Amino acid sequence: MIGKIGMIHAIESTLPSFKPVRLRPGLNLLLATRSRGATDRQTRNGAGKTSLVEIVHFLLGGKTTPGHVLKQEALAGQEFSMRLDLGGAEVEIRRSTDDRSPIAVEGDGILRWPIAPKLEKKTGRRIFAHDEWRAALGALMFGLPVDIPSKSSKPSFRMLFPYFARRDRDHGFEDFRRFGDKQGDGDQQIALTYLLGLDASIPLRLEETREREAALKKLKSEMTRGEFAGLVGKAADLRTELTVLEDRVAKSAAELAGFRVVPQYQELEAEANTITAQLAALSNEVQALDERVDHLRGAMESERPPIYADVEAAYHDAGLVLPGLIRRRFEEVHAFHRSVVENRRAHLGAELDQAERRRADIEVERARLGERLREILATLETGRALATYTKLQQEHARLVARTEAIRQRLTIAEQVELRSAELQLDRASLYKRLVADHHEEREQITAAIRAFESLSRALYEQAGSLTIDPTPRGPQVDVTIQGKRSKGITKMQIFCFDMMLMELCRARGIGPGFLVHDSHIFDGVDSRQVAKALELGAERTERLGFQYVVMLNEDQLPRESFRAGFEVERHVLDVRLTDATDDGGLFGIRF
């Protein structure tokens, strides 16, 4: 719903000393007298010209940050109001300097607005919450949709309106494209595209793409450094690592599947070791017994009694007869020795028999132990211990977990690479749409170019030019005027650009219906260009039906430079401001 677009009728306040400002159609000049000896900064701060722009913003949904003129203690609890044409009728807007207070609106037809004010039962006023008020202004002034929350919708009212009331404290007079130094490239492109009558959804999508690209770039940076380093990596490297790990997992799973756990594996292993030691000891004992048997057999063969017959034969050969006593003695000795030998052989035979029995017993024991050892070894060969199986399970689980982690990292890496490719395609598609839109809307772009050329030609002998270029980074708007590097020329670029926007918006039936410039618009501008700009403003407002409000120091008004017939005084407002006295400024008090 866009109704009749009009003008500001009056700005007032409950502050008793405030000087009401009543405006007229067309060009309005609010002058401030500069006292003798005052510096430029003292004049601007003392008279309050710039404060009028702040009040307009305040009443149209602007925020008051610390240091804002309306946050002064002397203004606490005061109410400011503005009468203007809005939604097809004249309405009055009231707002208190208390941040918590709502915006009160009075006037015909306000209940039929896209967002209607609520009834405040305590006072009977119709009021808006701050967000609702900005959304309502966006719909009424610029035809913005109201079904999207005002905080997230783009463009929004507060993205568009400041082009029609620039503020020096926001550095709004430094670049024609921006109304503030904190305005991002995306917001600037969206706002200007909308005001120029082009498809604002394209730079909006481009801004979203840039934000996703920035987030993706940050993610990639985090993936390669800091505490996140190595958490993802390159997809190609991860695919190779995943393949190797999957093979290892398959091999580990097969090994586990064929694994047989042997109960009491350690006990069997210990028994086998004991048997082996026992068999070794028995072998040593058998060797010793064999040596003992051989020794005993040799000893038995060597044991025999003395040969006494040889002694008797010797005597006989000698012709001697062995005496009977001696013969009897020999026989006794012979019998004794024979008895000894027989006893010795009997003893050796007993030892030999014992050794052979022991050796036979050992062979039986060795056979038994050997059979048991073979049984144990056969059992151990077919399986392993539970501890070994548990260790294999743990290793398998570790491999599976690592494989899954790599698989997840690969998924992320592939998503990052895919998202990067998708963003490139999105940007290319949006660039194509942007080129097509500029081609389809060439009449609108031509109108903007002609309007800027006409405005700049009225100020300078050589006309300036406006270019609107569709680029992969979004629509780029640029202007050129001869002498572009000078401060004054920069301000005239802004003047022509703002006037051009007013002209385009009037033709489309959108916009606030008024343009506000404070004296900063003419800083460093030659007095002849100031005169031409004011004449041009008066001519365009009359021809196109909008309101142009300019705040000037009186010594900035180039009365001698106006063309003949231009009655500048009829555009000067009745209220006059001065920094000469404490009550001479807009608020009637000095802060």
Image (cartoon, grey):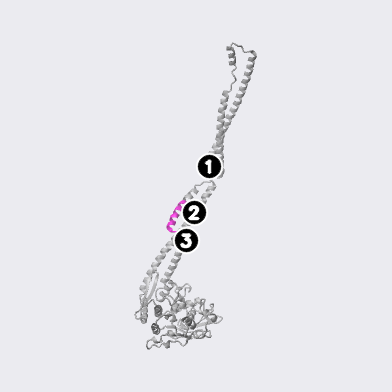
Q: Which residues are magenta?
A: 222-249
Q: Residue furthest left?
A: 462
Q: In the rendered image of this protein, does residue 153 appear above or below residue 49?
A: above
Q: Position of residue 140 (x, y in %)?
A: 45, 79
Q: Main secondary structure of the magenta part?
A: helix
- Quarter of the figure with residue 301: top right
Name the residue located 49 percent from the left edge and 54 percent from the top edge: 400
Count of all numbered marks drawn on residues in the image: 3
Mark pair 1, 2: CA separation: 31 Å
Whether the residues at callouts 1 and 2 have beta carbons within 8 Å, the answer is no
Quarter of the figure that contains the N terminus: bottom left
Q: Secondary structure at mark 3?
A: loop
Residue 205 among those drawn in magenta = no
Identify which residue, 67 or 555, lies in the foreground.
555
Q: Viewer-proximal residue, 308 or 145? A: 308
Q: Using the rendered image of the protein, determine whether residue 106 is visible from the camera's viewpoint.
A: no
Circle 2 sits on which residue? 400
Q: Secondary structure at mark 2?
A: helix
Which mark lies nearer to you, 3 or 1? 3
Q: Residue furthest top?
A: 319
Instruction: Say which label, 3 or 2, has the lower sequence index.
Output: 3
**As shown in the figure, which amino acid type bears the numbered disc 2?**
Val
Query: Residue 449's image quarter?
Result: bottom left
What type is the residue that disc 1 sits on? Answer: Thr
The percent coordinates of residue 142 (x first, y second) are 44, 78
Binning the other alpha carbons within 10 Å of mark 3 as few (below 14), some (14 to 19) or many (20 upward) gives few
Query: Mark 3: which amino acid?
Result: Arg
Q: Which residue is mark 1?
A: 379
Residue ID for mark 3: 225
Is residue 223 part of the magenta span, yes or no? Answer: yes
Label 3–label 1 contact, CB within 8 A: no
Where disc 1 sits, the SS reads: helix
